[in-house]
Image (tube, grey):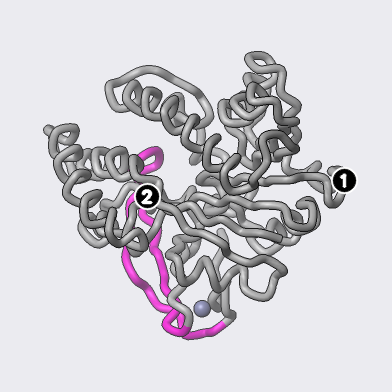
Amino acid sequence: MVHHNSCPLCSSAAINLKIVCNDHFKSNESFPVWACSVCGFCFTQDHPDETAIGKYYESEDYISHSDTSKGLVNKIYRMVRKRMLRKKRSILINETGLKQGTILDIGSGTGHFAAAMKDAGWMARGIEINKKASDASAENFGLDIISPSDISTLESNSFDSITLWHVLEHFNDLHGYIQEISRLLKPGGTCIIALPNISSYDADHFRQYWAAYDVPRHLWHFNPDTFGFLFEGKGFSMVNVRPLPLDVFYISILSERYKGNRMAFITGILKGSYFALPALFNKRKSSSLIYILKK
Ligand SMILES: [Zn+2]
């Protein structure tokens, strides 16, 4: 178990309990989320360490790893994923200004995004901790996927772009990863990081049921301010923040389900629309955000 005595972001000792969340996905155990009263950073407290976290991911339903197609929500997730893959690819091409180049997808899961970039003519590699997922990437798409423990074997300044789609919140060694990203990116290279937004309309509404808390798998809970603070002084400049507009529907449906609503799908779609509309005009309140950093 990992207990933080001080803020993992600014090191202040002024940290306090914010909310207690349940692991609705797997264990049904409770985990507290704490907040720093100096910098505002929120983090899961007393979470399993790297040797113990594995069992919290072990499920046929953990979609980013198992690629299952069971259930209505998962079916829709797959449809949306197809659409999102195209969107992510266009974001990457747009933000790098490159039609082709080298890309490292950290937390590549079953390899769909790296494969989409490979299809577009990029030299794509991935990093994935889950053996089943990385094997599937190699088998289905012929991708070269390495384990996180081998990240140090990758050559410095070798990637035009590094992407982390909803993965940074899972990493114990937050600061170590940022150092590695900085080492691996070419000067002028682009890092794209997508994260749930704890300051979103849907997080405010669902409180402890907000599905993107996803404790204890999500260790860190960012908003635009704390994300900016994390990268400050680390050799990056934040050039853009973009919303991921469809995530709010998936998160709202799941959150309604966690609340025990038997009409979770319908209510989730309705509430998702209700949160998505004002977020069009205030992207800092979007359910998920994509941060674009340049080295
Ligand atoms: Zn702090």
* Residue 212: numbered disc: 2
Q: Is residue 240 visible?
A: yes
Residue that badge 1 annotates: 155
- Looking at the rendered structure, the secondary structure element under dot 2 is helix
- 1 or 2: mark nearer the eye: 1
Q: Name the kind of residue labelled 2 in the image.
A: Ala
Q: Residue 86, how many percent across, how many down?
A: 49, 30
Classify the position of the N terminus by image quarter. Answer: bottom right
Residue at mark 1 to residue at mark 2: CA–CA distance? 34 Å
Classify the position of the C terminus by image quarter. Answer: bottom right
Local packing at callout 2 (Cα closer than 10 Å; few below 14, some 14-19, many 20+) is many
Q: Which residue is rendered at x = 70% and y = 40% of the image? A: 104
Local packing at callout 1 (Cα closer than 10 Å; few below 14, some 14-19, many 20+) is few
The residue lying toward the viewer, choosing from 206 and 2, is 206
- Looking at the rendered structure, the secondary structure element under dot 1 is loop
Q: Is residue 219 magenta?
A: no
Q: Name the kind of residue labelled 1 in the image.
A: Glu
Q: Which residue is rendered at x = 19% and y = 37% of the image? A: 269
Q: Residue 17, how many percent across, how many down?
A: 37, 73
Q: Is residue 107 above or below residue 59?
A: below
Q: Is residue 21 magenta?
A: yes
